Image: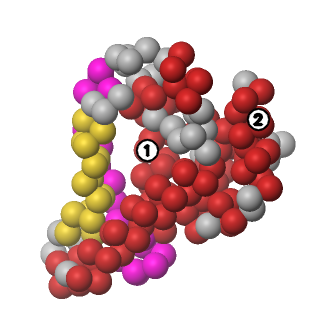
Amino acid sequence: MPEVAATLENAAVAQPAIEQPFVKELIKQWRAQDAHGAWDGKTDLDLLEPYIINKEQRRQMPIMGDPDPETLWRLELFYNAVGLVIERETGVMASSMMKMHHEGFGRLVLTAGRLIVVNKHLRDVHRFGFDTLDKLAAEGEKLVTAAVGMIHRFPEVAKFEA
């Protein structure tokens, strides 16, 4: 995976991506999953490496395929990080629900109260990843910004308590 390492090294030079709130939260999510300290020696960039899939690697993947459990877990961590950044920025808890077909397509929603703040149709999940760390950070920040905007637009629905 020398191409991925080179991509991550280039991303390390462009430090702002790793300093963005979404990327920091994604790293925290990974670290929180390590109950036995197996990843203590790994750098933050090492933890984010599975999210970086360049065009050549993507070409080598089959067009149709079943996502493995690790890929689904990575997807869950990504959207959990989105939800936690939304919560930190708004004070409203955002929780994710994902329904996935075994062939790699499905739907993910993030809700805040009774408000759906993220609604994503997922396909080709076995190929889930981003060309660069900057694109990973941009997608996370884009989802957070849109969700925070929805919460500010409909606060009475988002902050609804049953």
Report the residue marked by disc 1: 76
Identify the image quadrant of the N terminus: top right
Q: Are marks 2 and 1 in contact (CB under 8 Å)?
A: no
Identify the image quadrant of the C terminus: bottom left
Q: Nearer the viewer, residue 140 or 109?
A: 140
Q: Which residues are magenta?
A: 86-104
Q: In the visual, does 70 lie left or right of 87? A: right
Q: Position of residue 59 (x, y in %)?
A: 51, 20
Q: Quadrant of residue 42?
A: top right
Q: Amino acid at mark 2?
A: Ala
Q: Secondary structure at mark 1?
A: helix
Q: Amino acid at mark 1?
A: Glu
Question: Can I make out residue 99 in this image?
Answer: yes
Q: Residue at x 75, y 62 (%)?
A: 15
| CA neighbours of label 2 inside 10 A, class few (<14), some (14 to 19), many (20+) | some
Question: Can I make out residue 37 in this image?
Answer: no
Q: In the visual, does 37 lie left or right of 52? A: right
Q: Quadrant of residue 7?
A: top right
Report the residue marked by disc 2: 5
